[in-house]
Image (cartoon, grey):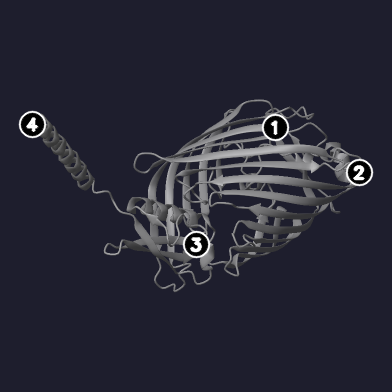
Amino acid sequence: MSFGLSRQIHLFLSLFLLTGVSIFSFGSNPEEKLLIQDVTIKGNKKTKDYIILRELAFKAGDSLFIADMKQAVSKSAENLMRLPLFHFVNTEIIENSGSRTAEIIIEVTERWYIWLWPVFEISDRNFNAWWKNGDLSRLSYGLFYQQENFRGRLEKLHISAKLGYQQQISLLYEIPYFNQKKTLGAGLILSAGRERETGYITREDKLEYYRANDFLRQMIETSLFLRFRPQIHHSHTLSIGLSRYFFSDTLLYLNPDYTGINKKQTSIPDIGYLMKADYRDNRGYPLKGWYADVLVNGFGLFPNSDYKFFTFRSSARIHIPLYNRWNTALEMASKFSTTGLKPWFLNQALGFNRDYIRGYEYYVIDGDNFLLMKSNIRYALIPGNIIKMPKIKANQFNTIPYSIYLGIFADAGMTWPETKVNSNQLQGKLLGGIGIGLDYVTYYDKVLRAEFSTNRERKTGFFLHFMAAI
């Protein structure tokens, strides 16, 4: 009898456990995956399908939960917007619940890819330095042919010819992929130029220029590069170049450190390695995500080279959406150089390209090394508005996106060591600038920034820029 009771208890427990498992299993009702049966691309009249498919975080045949699928589609749209190909990218997921499949539709609005620009180019470090001098004779003029999506394969073809203050002819050709895996690309840069006027020294922390009847400097530059892009966000670029320079006696007399050698000509071979990681939502004016790069350049390096030194440059930027229309951005950039003879014209620090402290647009701070920090807080006065122009038939121009941001900023930086020019007072000091600005953002990655700032020396100014600060 006890044996029978034991069997009844065992049977009862078994049924309870089985029922409990069954109830738990049905109660959780786990979400099933959807099979991506097809990926349909629309609107790409020029761009090849494989260029778009290369940027997607999914592919036909993948099985994903619907939440993961939506996230992958959203990330793919951001990846496509980082390319210089499209004004807009719209996506749609069409579910077929009966067969547990989905079709993903990607519709792009292509940019206009072929341009023939008249060139009126200022030859100063930035627009503000040129505008302060107000010298129209220091304009360069010519033609610039630009094709950003050559043959619909994301290839670049740039040809420019300039006369006037700086005379130059240049060619850039880049093919993003030449292997089946779409991971290897390559490019070629050729350039030749000459100058009757050039910046030759920094005095009182400003770039001084000299003008002559004959050409002060002539150069011929050739560069080849190979790019490896194993995944969407990362790339590695190896470059090899040779630059040939010719200098006048006048230039060498004005500043012997301009070349650092008692020669009227020199050849400088260089090899470089650039690593990039790009997780931004947009390349022209990002609002979220991050970006980082590291660039190593070796100059000279041959036994008979006039110069032998390395430079290490790096930058990191992060963009963080805050509450509602608020956004913040931070950047840190640096450059370090090894010891060795360096020509003055190749040893740039703060005051060139992106490397400047806001409030010091008129100044150049020399040095072998520098550290730079930038910060923004912005409020979207007009976030992501669109102007429709139905009378214009071309899709590349009849829809104009624009945004306006109001922000405050604070920058800081310093260079070291100090150079031989005693009149320069800003080297080796921690410099800072703060201010307020208004940014206007529109299509083709165009940005107009109007900023009012003051620096550590309590000098104020109103400045214009034509790219995002961070």
Instruction: Name the residue nearer the viewer: 313 or 438.
Output: 313
User: Which of the marked residues, 2 or 4, is nearer the chain's N terminus?
Assistant: 4
Between the C-alphas of marks 4 and 1, the distance is: 93 Å
Quarter holding the N terminus?
A: top left
User: Which of the marked residues, 1 or 2, is nearer the chain's N terminus?
Assistant: 2
Label 2 sits on what residue type?
Lys
Q: Nearer the viewer, mark 3 or mark 1?
A: 3
Residue 332 picture quarter: top right
Between the C-alphas of marks 3 and 4, the distance is: 73 Å
**Which mark identifies residue 1?**
4
* Local secondary structure at mark 1: strand
Residue visible at 85% across and 40% down in the picture: 254
Circles 3, 2 touching at the beta carbon (< 8 Å): no
User: Which of the marked residues, 3 or 1, is nearer the chain's N terminus?
Assistant: 3
Q: Nearer the viewer, mark 3 or mark 2?
A: 3
Label 3 sits on what residue type?
Leu
**Which mark identifies residue 297?**
none
Residue 292 x/y as whole percent: 57, 41
Residue visible at 53% across and 57% down in the picture: 83
* Local secondary structure at mark 3: helix
**Which mark identifies residue 369?**
1
Q: Nearer the viewer, mark 4 or mark 1?
A: 4
Residue 159 picture quarter: bottom right
Per the image, the residue denoted by label 2 is 263
Label 1 sits on what residue type?
Asn
Q: Nearer the viewer, mark 3 or mark 4?
A: 4
**Which mark identifies residue 53?**
3
* Local secondary structure at mark 2: loop
How many residues crowd mark 1 within 10 Å: few (<14), some (14–19), many (20+)? many
Residue 287 higher or lower than 56, as above or below: above
Residue 64 higher or lower than 101, as above or below: above
Observer able to see residue 165: no
